Image (cartoon, coloured by chain):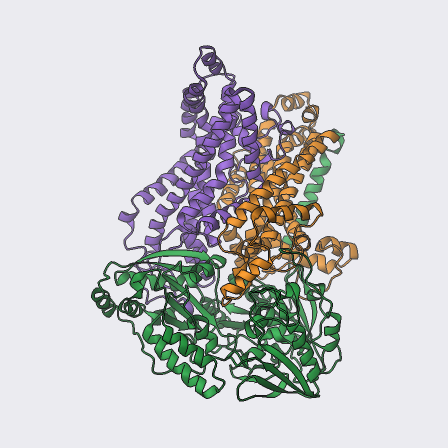
Amino acid sequence: MPTTPNAQNPSDDAGTPDTGTTGPAGGGTSLLTRKADKVDRLAELMGPRDNGTGGAGIWRTAFRRLRRSPMAISGAAIVAVFVLIALFAPLIAPYSATAQTWGGEVFPNQNIFVGPRAENWLGLDNLGRDQFSRMVIGARQTLLVGVVATLVGFGVGALIGGTAGAAATLGGRWGRTLDNAIMRVIDMMLALPTLLLAVTVAALIGASLTTVMLAVGIAQVPIFARLLRGAMIAQGNRDYVLAARALGVRTHRIALTHILPNSLGPVIVQSTLTLATAIIDAAALSYLGLGNPDPSFPEWGTMLADAQRFLSSAPQLAVYPALGIIVTALGFTLLGEAMREALDPKLRK
Amino acid sequence: MLRFIVRRTLQLIPTLGGLSILLFIWLQRLPGGPEYALLPDDATDAQRAQLRRSLGLDEPLTVQYVRFLRNILQGDLGTSLQTGRPVMEEFFTRFPATFELSVTAMLIAVAVGIPLGYLAARRRGGILDFSAVGGSLIGICTPVFFLAFILKVVFAERLGLFPSAFRLSPGLSRTDLSGFVILDGLRTGELDVVWDALMHLALPGLALASIPLAVIVRMTRASVLEVLDEDYVRTANAKGLHRRTVRGRHVLRNAMLPVVTAIGLLTGSLFAGAVLTESVFAFPGVGSFVYAATQTRDYPVLTGFILLIATMYVLINLLVDISYSLLDPRVRAQ
Amino acid sequence: MFTKTSRKPLALLAAAASVALLATACAESERDPESDAAEPFVFAAAGDIKSLDPFLASDGETFRYSRQVYETLLEHESGGSEIVGGLAETWEQSEDGTEWTFNLRDGVVFHDGDELTAEVVCANFDRWHNLSGAWQSSNNSYYWQAIFGGFAENEDEELPESRYVSCEATDELTAVITITEYSSIFPGGFSLAAFGILSPTSLETIADAEITGEEGGYTLPDYTTEPGAIAGSGPFTAQGWNRDQAEVTLQRFDDYWGEPAGFETMILRAIPDETARRQALEAGDVHGYDLVAPADVEPLTEAGFQVPTRDVFNVLYLAFQQETSEELGDLQVRQALAHAVDRQRIVDTILPEGGEVATQFHPDTLDGWSENVTTYDYDPELAEELLAEAGQEDLTLDFCYPTEVTRPYMPAPRDIFDVISQDLESVGITVEAKSYEWTEYIPNTDSGECSLYLLGWTGDYNDAYNFLGTWFSVKNDAWGMDEPELFDAMAEASGNPDPEERIAAYQGLNEQIMDILPGLPISSSPPSIVFAENVNPPNVSPLTQENFAEASWKE
């Protein structure tokens, strides 16, 4: 996405020279795996482990660490407040977010705006609507965009990556060919400028909130696909899979009941990070005019993009949604990063 | 090594071929068409239909694609529908601007990011570390277009330190050799042009640098932390080597490997980020031209530019891989 | 190799860092607020020009440039909308309106030293008429086709017969242009910037210029990008076109027949983004720009910039597509919608100063405007009553608006949309919002995809048919309106060569249209233009056809 090249994986701790199987140059397997290598590192974290404490153990220790991390606590607190506001938005908002109740008091063409006052805590927007109510209701829309976009990226990515991963580990020679083919397509997607991807997706299905969610989500697909595939391959090499195969368990059962659940950890971490990216990217799409067609319906990205025009005469109109976006994205990023650190033995010393 | 390069270069062909087919199908499926962007609003349906015909857009997609392939083999990427000039010419008219912007952004990111990340790692848990990590997190979480606006309001409008738009001051006379303003200025000795160009690059460069800067700070920090803990560093310290030697020779060099990779990656993705930055700063580069092309449905420009950008992206990463293998003997051995 | 060089990259980095820091830290503004006469005047346009030869263009940005460099036979009066002489001092039309005699100005010199004669004018028209090949694409000769139909030899069967018959130089300074039949597009058509007259030497050099390439890959000839290749007779000469900076440089032409230009050098630069244009002006990077956002007018005025108000020459309307939504076929419903919209609030809070509520489908600056049209005042209660009478209490309509554009007639489309849809919802109509970018918006509204949509028009020349005829001359999908009587009356008015009768006919048409109410005219608003404090601005034109030669630096 435009605003955040590579922010999908901000702390690029990956690709260190000793990651073995999918090492830095990727053995020259593909031209475009570079972007993907960072993702692969995360995927591996759930793979072979010397201390071999098993899945549940990792999670338990990770959670213990999280509780002591100030990063995790502040991230979780921001996220919790945001989610609470979003859930109970209609109860919190004092007025309707769409009614231009005070429409006669604001004259953008004469530079007359209404700032904070007793009945409107954050003042009025450029069409005479209560800004506080719009911020609160907007939180809900923003969360919706983030969650759905992440789910889209996660769902489609997991399907593709899961297929590739299962094929690679269990499918024999044909499986490896299939895996190869799928990954080449994913690499191609990585080479496409993501902004264009999003703009064209939006143009194809018309501007709407759904478009934004889809466009942002689709841009995340290659990341998730790569991630899950990497994690599955790492799992596939482990002893319990070998044992299950030796016992004659059918391959699709192994893939679904053993490998997949054990590979989901890094994907969940990535999802948290993606939520932040999705919120920021949605704002960028709104800025380009591809957001929700109904401008009265508040969403922070749209509000920010819309208020840019008044930056010199009424900066508060842009600053509130901008702060909202930054703080929320920060919350998700902190939480995601803390989770990643807690899971990664290399980072948690 | 040579075989490696050749193989990697050859792999470009199927990737670009696939990409071009995808683009072709995708772009043509977009609603609307150039006939609506190129003609005034009161044009009749007949006029629009005639334009479509004269542009060859009424023919089957396969015919158009074959023509495109035939042209591309002759090194011709077609002609822009907006401007009526060859796509290649359009690209190389605008590429220098984007190149200079991206390089500036990258220089800022590297020059500030690596030292900052290194210091943050050395003083882990200190105030510097806290503010570096915090600042880079906020950097990642701020929409670029908003940051660009803030920069402009503060530094151009209020303080008047920098120009708010363009690549050069209007009417500035200069000798044009290659389109690269700074290089040309240095070669011809027109230092005022170089200075003017640098001033114009400052704000958009800073805005575009925000995300790579944040990524590099955090990567450097993580990478240095990791290396500091390696056995060979401990050994070196134990051997009583001079602290500076240890840091320079062992820590930094090894810590730089993943950072170099990231720089390659980030440079590629800067092109995408440039779209927003260029439009906010009226910086006449590839990014804003491509964006305009999506709005006018300028198919040849979109296809051509994206293929060219993808090629560059791939080549940059090839370069990174080569430098990587030069830096790291283990990769070379593979 | 490793050990010895390891510190060098670091040193380099440090050097780079310090250079970058230096560049940022000691960046002193060197711009001089004092203006001396030789300083170039920089004007920010919304886009780059398309071609140096205006004939190939159909966009306002190219025409803004070309009006300074090339002159047309007729033009609009400075600061107004009346048609006056340009290169032709006076002109006459024959009774049936098919013969147009132009008495050219004496002593007009082209930039290359050639002199203007009737033969030169005819050579220009004959060249256009005889163009062939890709020149006949509607993209490359749009206005020729709009005014004169086809060419001497049409290569595309779909092209209409040419309306142009001949041009004769009856003496040194008299050119007679004959057309097949009169239409109300004359004489306005002769004022279009696309028909800028080129010097005879230029015509010779470009006689062989061709649009090369095959279908889908047409390349414009080089002369369209080489400044100085073609000479006009305007107050400025085209000095340079830096396509990499989107910058056109104009130089004062000292032998101009009229008052010489006030600026020695004028530079046009493209800044597509509206906010970026304002910021460039405030930062002193440009000295003026066009299409000021209405919200910026007041702050700019307060900051000391000059925002002269243009007369309005456009109209914005809300269309009621009568076929897409059957309900809109009911006149009562359309009347209800008209009464439901508070147009005064749009004018008061969104449009720039000088904007006004429109009562009919063209602005009052145009002849043919009628005082006696039916008006529809804001009255939500009446609207609800009308809806109830029509049995449409639960009306659902989709309502389209364009994103990412501002048109001179439609600043801030999103806000206007927002106010209207709020008004409609408050009388009980459910509005389904749809937004499209411009390239999609036009096809969607043209083909009747939208029940309600916002659109408008800025006049090209002073004739009401340029507005009304565009919309209401035949049944089309944009309106879904079938009123044969209206269409016939429209054709009759347009074909009437007598100006006074025609204007009376237009007044009748306006009244008829507002009874039928195919849509609701919302407003006419002046597109704002702004200049720095130290500039004597040119007379601002309602048709946005400013003559920048009139502008100069303040002493």
Query: A181 above or below A251?
Result: below
> Going by the image, does C522 lie left or right of B310?
left
> Going by the image, does C427 lie left or right of C527?
left
Q: Position of residue C338 (x, y in %)?
A: 31, 69
Query: C360 above or below A298?
Result: below
Count numbered badges in the picture.
0
Residue pushed farthest right? B188
Which quarter of the figure has residue A99? Answer: bottom left
> Going by the image, does C225 lie left or right of A259?
right
Residue pushed farthest front? C157
Q: Position of residue C190 (x, y in %)?
A: 58, 79
Q: Where is residue B200 in the image (x, y as percent from the top left)?
A: 63, 57
Q: Position of residue C415 (x, y in %)?
A: 40, 62
Q: Residue at x 66, y 38 (%)?
A: B13
Query: A320 above or below B123?
Result: below
Can you see residue C37?
no
> Going by the image, does B317 lie left or right of C205?
left
- B309 or C181, which lies in front? C181
Can you see residue A132?
yes
- A22 or C154, which lies in front? C154
- C413 or C200, which lies in front? C200
Q: Which chain is purple?
A: A
**Colour representing chain B:** orange
- C44 or A222, which lies in front? A222
**Colour representing chain C:** green
